[in-house]
């Protein structure tokens, strides 16, 4: 089912300042969409139903990319559980409800691969949702994300809303959070190697054992997949978005080291958590629809590091000063 979206349609990107939202805006603008709507955190608190409903009433978006959320890496997830569950449950609830109230034609909700059980069979197929216990370091975030999927399904079943859900793997790219405490592994390692190079330090600390396996997808590929799904997917079930390829954290660290600071040495801090042992998505359904990623990991690491070098203001931010993003 391909349904081309009118380039004059009103399209709201919730979370446009974040890693994902900014990539979605770039993707939509490149495709010629003329009415891309955004609202800053100061203008609109997405956790407040009154504000969100009021905004939808005034702006009446035809399509919504719900890619906002409180997000972060393994440490932020395990130390700030209340924010991760509350913010995300509220954001999904308010936006999905307002989209229904004010006649949004289609909404795409973005979840996360951490919704699946810790011991899921690899690669992880969509039907493994709710078949076992979650990874404890991020169960609060995962529960909120699972609720988001169910919310979209419930509004589809009860009200006939065309609300779909996509589950991306670990993402990276421009506008990522490079903070060492709250960021995900790829941007955190990039920043650590970069700081070590500037300081002339030889050893770079990698959390955990280095053995966990992770899959990575460049955020421009994710944005492209989201735009593709908006025009080509309309199903009750959520759908995985990934590259289908994974590597160990040790191998990832080697890749980042070779791009940023080849002279450095890796030091593994085994007192830090590993998190889930392996998490690679089965992307057969998305591939069968005709979508595949374009950015390989080596190219993506190089271009993201170049982007980071171009962001002087990010590099000038003292460590630990940035907070967890409220945009996905
Ligand atoms: O990316 P990350 O924080 O999150 O960590 P998850 C991935 C792996 O990299 C873990 C290791 O095994 C970390 O211990 N790691 C090594 C590091 N060095 C570092 C470092 O300097 N910083 C970080 N952050 N990790 C997240 C979930 O899980 O995945 C979220 O917490 C979300 O909820 C996201 O689902 C996609 O991949 O373990």
Image (cartoon, rainbow, N blue to C red):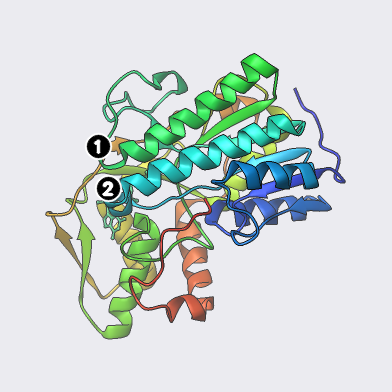
In the displayed structure, 271 sits above or below 234; it is below
Q: In this view of the protein, can residue 131 be seen by the observer?
A: yes
Q: Circle 1 is placed at which residue position? A: 136
Mark closer to the chain start, 2 or 1? 2
Q: Circle 2 is placed at which residue position? A: 78
**Residue at (81% x, 45% y) in the render:** 10
User: Which element is circle 1 on?
Assistant: helix
Looking at the rendered structure, the number of numbered marks drawn on it comes to: 2
User: Which element is circle 2 on?
Assistant: helix
**Residue at (53% x, 70% y) in the render:** 307
In the displayed structure, 191 sits above or below 72; it is below
Picture quadrant of residue 169: top left
Looking at the image, which residue sits at the far left? Answer: 271
Q: Is residue 40 left or right of residue 63?
A: left
- Which residue is at the front of the view, 280 or 162? 162
Q: Is residue 83 left or right of residue 11?
A: left
- Which residue is at the front of the view, 208 or 237? 237
Q: Is mark 1 within 8 Å of ligand 1?
A: no
Circle 2 Cα neighbour tier, 10 Å, few/some/many (<14 / 14–19 / ≥20): some
Q: Is mark 2 within 8 Å of ligand 1?
A: yes
Q: Split into 4 quadrants, where in the image is the N terminus?
A: top right
**Residue at (37% x, 59% y) in the render:** 183
- Name the spot of residue 216 as percent of width and height, x first: 43, 47
- Which residue is at the front of the view, 91 or 200? 91
In the displayed structure, 135 sits above or below 133; it is below
- Name the spot of residue 69 as percent of width and height, x first: 50, 47
Label 2 – label 1 distance at C-alpha: 8 Å
Q: Is residue 263 left or right of residue 96?
A: left
- Check whether the beta carbons of the residues at disc 2 and disc 1 lie within 8 A of each other: yes
- Name the spot of residue 159 as percent of width and height, x first: 69, 18
Q: In this view of the protein, can residue 242 be seen by the observer?
A: no
């Amino acid at each position: 089912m391909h349904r081309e979206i009118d380039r004059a349609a009103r399209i709201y990107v919730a979370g446009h300042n974040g890693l994902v939202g900014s990539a979605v805006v770039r993707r939509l603008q490149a495709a010629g969409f003329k009415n891309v709507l955004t609202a800053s955190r100061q203008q609109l608190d997405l956790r407040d139903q009154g504000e969100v409903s009021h905004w939808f009433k005034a702006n009446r978006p035809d399509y919504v990319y719900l890619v906002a959320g409180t997000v972060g890496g393994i440490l932020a997830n395990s130390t700030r559980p209340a924010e991760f569950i509350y913010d995300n449950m509220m954001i999904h609830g308010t936006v999905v409800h307002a989209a229904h109230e004010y006649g949004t034609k289609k909404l795409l909700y973005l979840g996360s691969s951490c919704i699946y059980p810790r011991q899921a069979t690899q690669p992880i197929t969509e039907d493994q949702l709710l078949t076992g216990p979650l990874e404890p370091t991020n169960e609060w975030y995962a529960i909120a994300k699972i609720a988001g999927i169910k919310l979209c399904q419930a509004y589809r079943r009860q009200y006939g809303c065309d609300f779909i859900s996509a589950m991306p793997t670990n993402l990276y790219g421009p506008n990522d959070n490079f903070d060492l405490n709250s960021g995900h592994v790829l941007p955190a390692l990039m920043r650590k190697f970069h700081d070590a190079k500037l300081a002339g330090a030889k050893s770079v600390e990698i959390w955990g054992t280095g053995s966990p396996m992770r899959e990575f997808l460049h955020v421009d590929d994710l944005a492209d997949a989201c735009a593709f799904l908006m025009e080509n997917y309309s199903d009750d079930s959520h759908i995985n978005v990934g590259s289908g390829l994974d590597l160990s954290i040790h191998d990832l660290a080697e890749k980042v080291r070779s791009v940023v600071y080849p002279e450095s040495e890796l030091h593994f801090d085994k007192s830090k958590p590993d998190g889930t042992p392996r998490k690679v998505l089965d992307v057969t359904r998305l591939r069968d629809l005709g979508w595949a990623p374009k950015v390989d990991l080596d190219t993506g690491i190089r271009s993201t590091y170049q982007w980071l070098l171009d962001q002087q203001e990010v590099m000038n931010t003292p460590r630990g000063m940035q907070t967890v993003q409220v945009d996905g």
